[in-house]
Amino acid sequence: MSDIKKVVLAYSGGLDTSVILKWLQDTYQCEVVTFTADLGQGEELEPARQKALKFGIKPEQIYIDDLREEFVRDFVFPMFRANTVYEGEYLLGTSIARPLIAKRLIEIVNETGADAICHGATGKGNDQVRFELGAYALKPDVKVIAPWREWDLLSREKLLNYAETHGIPIDMKHRQGGSPYSMDANLLHISYEGRHLEDPNAEAEEDMWRWTVSPEKAPDAAEYLTLDYKHGDVVAINGQAMKAHEVLAKLNEIGGKHGIGRLDLVENRYVGMKSRGCYETPGGTILLKGHRAIESITLDREVAHLKDDLMPRYASLIYNGYWWSPERKALQVLIDHTQQHVNGSVRLKLYKGNVIVVGRDSKTDSLFDSTIATFEDDAGAYDQKDAGGFIKLNALRMRIAAKLDARRK
């Protein structure tokens, strides 16, 4: 008999987690609490409740939580304040959702008196690391059940046979060869992995993409929009104030229409392998472009360069599951401090897959001084003779080295 009496399962209601639910009941003979997070994935979540009820889960132990605002406000926006990009391209759509799910899992453990959490991440992926690092950081002694590292259902055929044996509903798409891709979606992105994409030289089929039109089929007329920023976060689009999750949803809609945010990437997973995935992140792509634009006139040069130096480390921390680590928290304090004066507006032009900055302005915090930067008469605002001494001082060490090299010859 297991010493685990109650477990909180991260439950999507799909085939894998439905099999896991039944497997937990059979293997651990424990009480199961299901948790389904609404992160804006655009799917109907009520069927997850009905499936959980069918498995005998008590109604009061079925959690379906709308976390969209918390997700964007407390996770996505703080990440974009750092202009975060992993390996030069990936906007971390999957990675940034995992610490919130881990947080809520632990909250439910505390609320229900559960002994453990359970997730459906495979033993090959990054998500197992992210879920479990987050859980241990928030509740050091929590037990973690990872079925893909325990059971022998390691093929699609075995999984389907188990489901059929135990009366678990199977969608026709699984019977007819399976869903073509492994997908993850939330308000920030949708990802595609597996099947056709396992050949890194094979172009993704056009009908795979769900959120964006191809740039070739995007409107022939450009669309302009204005983003208003306060402390580094977008608070309004075209003058209309919005909540955080509304901002991202609106930018997804606009960006997707113009074919913005597609990415085909071979990334380096934390577990050591290379993995190919395709991503659609229309709203995030717009956010990143706009944020860099407003920072360009409101951030001190050396502060901006310091942020750029720190960003790859910050991105790796999120990718590798260290959102709740002391080093990520410390970096966030610094990043958020730099955003105190990142206020103003940015004008963007969207056209056939491109996000083009066409204007930026800050009435209160702009460091751009046109009287100094002008190519016309600056009326003495800048003394060009000062540059001579600056150049000579910075060239001194190179001049000394050059003279020494000449003597050595």
Image: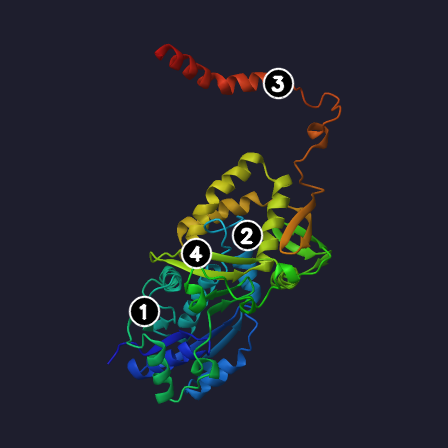
Q: Amino acid at mark 4?
A: Val
Q: Nearer the viewer, mark 1 or mark 3?
A: 3
Query: Does the image show residue 1?
Result: yes
CB under 8 Å between discs 3 and 2: no
Q: Which residue is mark 2?
A: 80
What amino acid type is highlighted by mark number 2? Phe
Which residue in the protein does label 1 denote?
A: 143
Dot 4 or dot 2: first in sequence order is 2
The answer to which quarter of the image holds residue 404 is: top left
Between residue 336 and residue 92, name the one nearer to us.
92
Mark 2: few/some/many CA within 10 Å (<14, 14-19, 20+): some
Instruction: Give residue 271's quadrant in the image.
Output: bottom left
Q: Kindly identify which residue carries mark 3.
A: 386
Where's residue 150, x and y in %?
A: 28, 73
Residue at the location (40% across, 63% down)? 127
Q: CA distance from mark 3 to mark 2?
A: 38 Å
Give the mark nearest the N terminus, 3 or 2: 2
Q: Position of residue 157 (x, y in %)?
A: 35, 80
Q: CA distance from mark 3 to mark 4?
A: 48 Å
In the figure, residue 148 lies in which quadrant? Answer: bottom left
In the image, residue 9 above or below residue 402: below
The mark found on residue 266 in the picture is 4
Question: From where the camera sits, is residue 247 visible?
Answer: no
Measured in 3D between alpha carbons, the distance from the residue under mark 4 to the one under mark 1, in whole angstroms, is 33 Å
